[in-house]
Amino acid sequence: MRRTHFLQTSLTSLLLIAVGLVALAQADAGYRGITFSPDGSCLLAVYSDGKWSFIYKIPIDTGKATRLTAATSGYEGLPSYSADGKQIAYSFSPGPGTNSRIFIANPDGSNAHPLANSGTSDFGALLSPDSKSVIFKRYGYYGKYSPIARPAQHEWNFYTADLNGDNMRRLTSESLYEVSPASLSPDGKSLVFVDSFEAIVIHPLEEMSKPNAVLKPRLNGKKAEVYGEAVFSADGKSILFTAAFNKGGKYDYNVYQLDLRTQNVESLTSAKGHAGQLQISRDGQKAVFLHEDYDRTDGKATVFLLDLKTHDLTPLTINGIH
């Protein structure tokens, strides 16, 4: 377990965590995650109004958002779809001080039902390709290991269980100090995630296993100062990830693509500000992410669609979220 992580982390990384990575997460209101529907025609977004967080469905052609569920309070997490598009899985907590549980529902949000109560909080639900199990993460400690660090959820591990909550297995062999959202490989055999902002980890879905690979891709000949998030491409042959360098005291995040065979890295965006919540459409044609301009006075993030062939960026105007 990485209880001494912050004591060993450079001041640069501490400033990054305080200024960059938590800018979106600690805003009074804003997006908490975004992803594609199976056919790529819609986005699902989690938006916080400053009190509760709910899932919205957003057609890309109109940008008109509507609520997915009928919950009137609580904190809904970003859902994932089953391979056949007939189910979604997401986390839900009814209010402050309550555990977050994994819920399985129909794609329209109906018939939502939780896994068996684990007595702890579970997040980041991913449905397996055969739709028979769900992968999720849970933390073992909330607090801080250093007086200059913010209190946060630490000691993360990934688990998998049947959809009724049975046959639960722990996948990771060590508790991770901090971990990004995970992405499941198309063949359902591996997860990819960023460990403590320091490395991209490819991890097998085997009980108490070790990583298959720990990657620190070099960008323009040098290692990034921080890695944000990572997702598998639609064919599983590459990984898209966000990474940042310090530019005058601010960390500029951009999107990159790593070829897993050649280890070549291609830069897909070039912008100033924070980029996060990266996801790829199932057909592999486009990606979506949130971008926050540090000079924007309202602190709001813009949703961008990224064409993975042309690298064209399109901002999406969304209305109906409040």
Image (cartoon, rainbow, N blue to C red):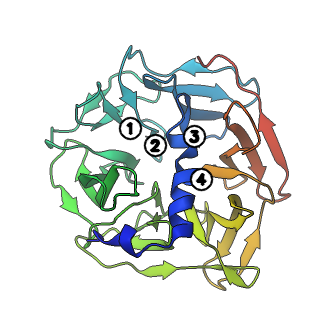
Secondary structure under badge 2?
Answer: strand
Q: Nearer the viewer, mark 4 or mark 3?
A: 4
- Say which quarter of the image contains residue 206: bottom left
Q: Position of residue 12 (x, y in %)?
A: 57, 68
Q: Amino acid at mark 1?
A: Tyr
- Say which quarter of the image contains residue 175: bottom left
Q: CA distance from mark 4 to mark 2?
A: 26 Å
Badge 1 vs badge 2, beta-carbon distance below 8 Å: yes
Q: CA distance from mark 3 to mark 2?
A: 10 Å
Q: CA distance from mark 1 to mark 4?
A: 26 Å
Which label is found at residue 80? 2
- Say which quarter of the image contains residue 270: bottom right
Q: CA distance from mark 1 to mark 2?
A: 7 Å
The front one of 297 and 105 is 297
Q: Residue at x 86, y 58 (%)?
A: 310
**Callout 4: few (<14), some (14-19), or many (20+) C-alpha neighbours within 10 Å?**
many
Which label is found at residue 20? 4
Q: Residue at x 57, y 40 (%)?
A: 34
The residue under label 3 is: 34
Quadrant (top left/top right/bottom left/bottom right) for the N terminus: bottom left
Q: Is residue 183 left or right of residue 97?
A: right
Which label is found at residue 90? 1
Q: CA distance from mark 1 to mark 3?
A: 12 Å
Q: Residue at x 39, y 47 (%)?
A: 124
Q: Amino acid at mark 2?
A: Ser
Q: Position of residue 19 (x, y in %)?
A: 58, 52
**Callout 2: few (<14), some (14-19), or many (20+) C-alpha neighbours within 10 Å?**
many
Q: Position of residue 290 (x, y in %)?
A: 66, 44
Quadrant (top left/top right/bottom left/bottom right) for the C terminus: top right
